[in-house]
Image: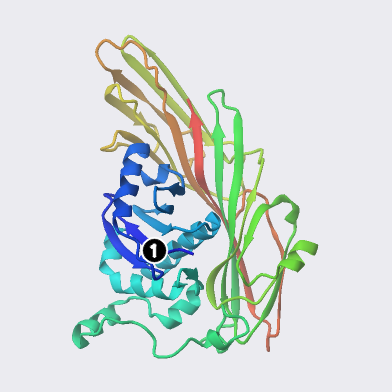
Amino acid sequence: MLQCIFLLSDSGEVMVEKQMAGHRVDRAICGWFWNYVLAHAAGDPSKILQVVVSPTHYLFQIYRNGVTFLACTQVEMPPLMAIEFLSCVADVLTDYLGDLNEDIIKDNFVIVYQVLDEMMDNGFPLTTEPNILKEMIAPPNIVNKMLNVVTGKSSTLGSKLPDAAASFVPWRSTVVKDASNEVYVNIVEELDACVNREGVLVKCEAYGEVQVNCSLPGVPELTMSFANPTIINDVTFHPCVRFRPWESNQVLSFVPPDGQFKLMSYRVKKLKKTPIYVKPQLTSDSGNCRVSVMVGIRNDPGKPIDSITVQFQLPPLIVSADLTANYGTVDILADKTCLWTIGQIPKDKAPVLSGNLRLEEGLAQLHTLPTFQVKFKIMGVALSGLQIDKLDVKNMPSAPYKGFRAQTQAGKYEVRS
């Protein structure tokens, strides 16, 4: 049972305090937590463990876009339940507010408190489905804000329970309005890879989600199967998915929520190929370090590779940097990060970044070599190889339109020099 949830800014300021149970948690626990962050992670909450034990409480935390979600309890409970609930709160608020950061939360205090009220009851998760919450609490928009100013009201709570409260599937309303009789399935993957200094691929995994946008009338029954389900691991499902058909035949059987939702997530391990290569070379002597970085296509995915960027942190002992590229733009940011924006790789030449780094006086060679972070996006293909075989829709008066799409982007893609 969670007793309290706090939302903290990057400076440790308490922006939101929501007491969940009868026993009140003193706000001083936030001061203890922030001192712990300063002592163990130099003020960066993303670098500490998600479960922290204080002298008086068990603390659970996640970090999203400069906001720390902190939950407290004095009783033993499954840590994954608390972490999953905090992740769900962050996802719902992002869905409600369009984005999530310190300023947006401060501008929408009322919405945040109302959402937290409905998502948990006396310390236990209650309503976590975004579609139902939106029927109970209207998302913020310009019209609502103007009406609140004119009428003096600040509540966006609905006057009646959502239709889904009377449904046998609580994530779906009994009456779906403005259904256009179509369903779209989108496979979205992030590729995590690590290439060592010899250019050998040490690790390559894909983390993916199957996202669905459903606009079907009534209570449809959907069945979806993959052409190669054996390649995926570590699957998690939306509550609408029936587990037994998946366990026996690797088939997804479900009654979908109305609108957009994440049907499942998965991981594909031990991939052997990456779409692009990055070859850095750094040689230093006599107080100078010469840099050369080449980028090219290693395995053509059959679709254009867009939004390619390469960035690295300049070593701390660098006095000045003179870097240019034969393609794209090179920027040295305020935090001494070099950002090389390429976009698409041209067909007639390989993009190359080259230049010189000047070391501090008295330093002959560079002893700390940077790690290169690579970003890219590929529309129309899932690099893991996962493919949808078929999607059947039942309990429908007419055949719906079905659309499919896939995309892959770089996650934590590192090349060491």
The image position of residue 235, as x and y in percent, is 65, 56
Query: Is residue 89 shown left or right of residue 211?
Result: left
Identified at 36% across, 13% down, the residue is 365
Identified at 43% across, 90% down, the residue is 160
Identified at 44% across, 47% down, the residue is 52
- How would you rate the neighbour count of disc 1 (Cα within 10 Å): few for under 14, some for 14-19, many for 20 or more? many
Quickly name the residue at label 1. 4
Q: Is residue 263 above or below residue 150?
A: above
Secondary structure at numbered mark 1 = strand
Task: Looking at the picture, tell me which residue is in the foreground, 40 or 311.
Answer: 40
Task: Looking at the picture, tell me which residue is in the foreground, 278 or 359.
Answer: 359
The image position of residue 188, as x and y in percent, is 56, 57
Any part of residue 43 in sight: no
Query: Is residue 337 shown left or right of residue 198?
Result: left
Q: Is residue 52 above or below residue 286?
A: below
Residue 38: quarter of image: top left
Any part of residue 293 in sight: yes
Residue type at numbered disc 1: Cys
The image position of residue 117, as x and y in percent, is 40, 74
The image position of residue 344, as x and y in percent, is 47, 44
Q: Is residue 48 above or below residue 387?
A: above
Identified at 34% across, 59% down, the residue is 7
Query: Is residue 396 shown left or right of residue 294?
Result: right
